[in-house]
């Protein structure tokens, strides 16, 4: 009896799940939206807090207001204009990063119940009476298998403008007071969220820069709040003192302040502050330049050649950490820096000079932070955070300047420095991958792209960067020629990889007409209903439709793609005829023009499963 009950339950669940995937999203009601005012009555000249509440059906999600992929449709709230009313900023809820069967990486989504808040500011000229604010909630709904067409849902928010709230009864006053307390609490939460997001307020629109999942995680660190970011940058600056190119500056610092031996510890402490501020100002300039270059930097990182150049530079610095060659401060410059300058202004100038020496050495290590600040375009915050990093780097110098005798207490050079050097070499390789992999994902011939990068880096390293003793003049010339040829070969590989197009299926792109007019005589037909905002559709193009076996068997079919992104009336009718609502929808039609309904699929299909369906239709 139990087994029969279990089987019956499974059958019911199967029928229910199939009905969900076959229905139109309007019937499913992916989202139910409503709106409300937190103050039912308000006087002219005051403000009204409003909320738009969206209840998302179980097992569904909608894209975030700022999607993690640029082709996804964002969730947006739009208000219709209302006379004598000014709208405040719209505050969207925090997103969830979720991974679905159709995506390789996590996607920013909303699930469950979400609340979107804003504020209405009433002009003093607004007339008393009942008002209705109308708006639209736009979204794209998906489940774990497929995505549906974008929808627009309307909502209304009623409120009343009164000339004198004192005529309200005592009960209404208490309700208003309670509502105000709730509103204040929410406003406090909202203001805290705005503070945490202030650090990226000057960011350029995300529609022009595509952020990878790694970049989104890095942004989250900044979005945790300004105090958190300041602490992180300070600690990173402090850690920079362990790098081999920064460590030699420590005795230089002690030597400089040792020349001020006639000064008391208090005066030496003040001088050390000026010294450290000089270092921090150089780092602040680096942050300022990065932030100001944000727009151009973002577009540059969409260029594969720029990414290759940056990656090669970082890999070269990593190679130097493993001992391939040395990056050292010129002895003549170190000698000049060692000359004593007196006074606080002299200490400031000395700090500026030392900062200029340190910054290029540390550039390879901090280039990830430089790139992040640049891509986000946070000018003021970027400048301040790099200034904080400079202060962290200079903190030990304050103690060394005040207590010059501490030099003898410092760890002596040894194998620990070699280990730290290699550690930073490994980290630099990680930074190189951070910049390189997102660009490589968009290139079809990834193998050629990787080999090209390797050849460019290898030619640079073997031909020009290796300065080990013992090479004869003739060998140096030969290795230079070899390195140049390697670099040219790498450029050739990269150029071909960037311009290589994928082995595509011979698609017919549907615009109008009938299948009979489009199909090749005597061939079965495959229909692919897709949209640009559809993540599973992108996955099909990346994996299944690029599979060599699929490309080969597709030659025996009439392959038709139907773009449902912004469908015309003809396309809408075609979609309705073939019951295509969720994207992607795949329809298999035999040689006689009959649909094989048992082969119909909605959502991403692995290449092996797709091949099995194609072969079954051919049989």
Image (cartoon, helix red, strand yellow):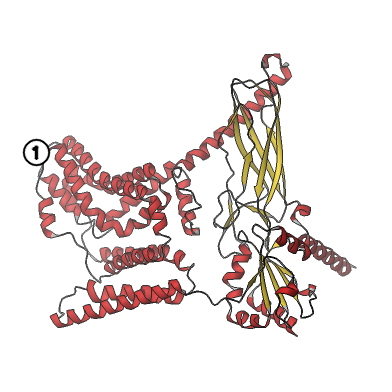
Residue 433 shown left or right of residue 606 in the figure? left
Rendered-image quadrant of the C terminus: bottom right
- Left or right: 567 with respect to 208? right
Q: Is residue 589 visible?
A: yes
Q: Quadrant of residue 464?
A: bottom left
> With 539 as the anchor, is 203 left or right in this view?
left
Residue 437, image x, y percentages: 44, 66
Instruction: Identify the residue shown where x is 16% and y is 41%.
Output: 347
Residue 590 pos. (x, y %): 77, 79
Instruction: In this rendered view, identify the residue nearer to me: 605 or 481.
Output: 481
For residue 107, which quarter of the picture?
Answer: bottom right
Read off the residue under disc 1: 262
431 or 203, which lies in front?
A: 203
Q: Position of residue 591 (x, y in %)?
A: 76, 81
Whether 66 is drawn above or below 35: the answer is: below
Does residue 130 lie above or below 430 as drawn?
A: above
């Amino acid at each position: 009896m139990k087994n029969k009950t279990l089987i019956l339950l499974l059958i019911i669940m199967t029928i229910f799940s199939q009905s969900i995937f076959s229905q139109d999203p309007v019937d499913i009601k992916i989202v139910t939206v409503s709106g409300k005012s937190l103050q039912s009555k308000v006087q002219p000249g005051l403000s009204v807090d409003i909320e738009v509440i969206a209840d998302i059906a179980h097992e569904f999600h909608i894209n975030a207001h700022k999607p993690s992929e640029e082709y996804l449709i964002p969730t947006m709230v739009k208000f219709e204009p209302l006379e004598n009313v000014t709208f405040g900023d719209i505050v969207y809820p925090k997103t969830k990063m979720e991974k679905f069967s159709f995506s390789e990486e996590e996607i920013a989504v909303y699930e469950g119940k979400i609340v979107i808040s804003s504020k209405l500011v009433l002009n003093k000229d607004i007339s008393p009476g009942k008002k209705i604010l109308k708006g639209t909630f736009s979204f794209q709904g998906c489940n774990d298998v497929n995505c549906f067409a974008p929808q627009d849902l309307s909502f209304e928010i009623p409120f009343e403008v009164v000339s004198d709230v004192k005529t309200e009864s005592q009960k209404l006053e208490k309700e208003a007071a309670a509502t105000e307390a709730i509103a204040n609490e929410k406003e406090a939460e909202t203001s805290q969220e705005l503070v945490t997001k202030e650090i990226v307020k000057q960011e350029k629109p995300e529609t022009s820069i595509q952020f990878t999942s790694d970049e989104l995680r890095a942004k989250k660190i900044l979005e945790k709040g300004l105090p958190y970011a300041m602490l992180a940058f300070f600690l990173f600056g402090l850690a920079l003192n362990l790098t081999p190119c920064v460590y030699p500056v420590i005795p230089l610092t002690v030597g400089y302040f040792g020349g001020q031996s006639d000064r008391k510890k208090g005066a030496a402490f003040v001088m050390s502050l000026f010294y450290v501020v000089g270092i921090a100002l150089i780092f602040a300039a680096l942050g300022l330049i990065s932030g100001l270059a944000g727009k151009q930097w973002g577009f540059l990182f969409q260029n594969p050649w720029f990414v290759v150049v940056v990656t090669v530079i970082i890999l070269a610095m990593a190679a130097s950490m493993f001992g391939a060659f040395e990056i050292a401060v010129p002895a003549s410059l170190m000698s000049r820096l060692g000359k004593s300058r007196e006074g606080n202004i002299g200490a400031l100038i000395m700090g500026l000079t030392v900062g200029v020496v340190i910054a290029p050495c540390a550039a390879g290590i901090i280039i990830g932070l430089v790139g992040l600040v640049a891509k986000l375009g946070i000018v003021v915050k970027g400048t301040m955070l790099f200034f904080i990093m400079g202060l962290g780097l200079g903190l030990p110098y304050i103690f060394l300047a005040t207590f010059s005798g501490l030099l003898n207490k410092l760890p002596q050079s040894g194998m620990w420095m070699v280990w730290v050097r290699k550690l930073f070499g490994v980290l630099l390789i990680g930074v190189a991958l951070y910049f390189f992999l997102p660009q490589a994902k968009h290139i079809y011939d990834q193998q050629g792209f990787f080999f090209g990068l390797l050849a460019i880096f290898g030619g640079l390293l073997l031909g020009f960067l290796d300065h080990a003793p013992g090479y004869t003049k003739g060998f140096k010339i030969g290795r230079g020629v070899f390195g140049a040829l390697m670099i040219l070969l790498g450029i050739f590989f990269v150029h071909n990889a960037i311009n290589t197009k994928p082995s595509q299926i011979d698609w017919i792109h549907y615009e109008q007409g009938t299948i009979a007019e489009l199909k090749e005589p005597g061939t079965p037909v495959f229909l692919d209903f897709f949209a640009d905002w559809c993540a599973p559709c992108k996955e099909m193009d990346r994996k299944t439709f690029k599979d060599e076996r699929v490309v080969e068997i597709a030659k025996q079919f009439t392959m038709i793609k139907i773009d449902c992104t912004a469908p015309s009336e003809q396309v809408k009718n075609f979609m309705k005829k073939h019951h295509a609502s969720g994207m992607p929808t795949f329809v298999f039609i035999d040689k006689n023009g009959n649909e094989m309904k048992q082969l119909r699929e909605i959502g991403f299909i692995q290449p092996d499963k797709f091949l099995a369906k194609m072969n079954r239709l051919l049989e």
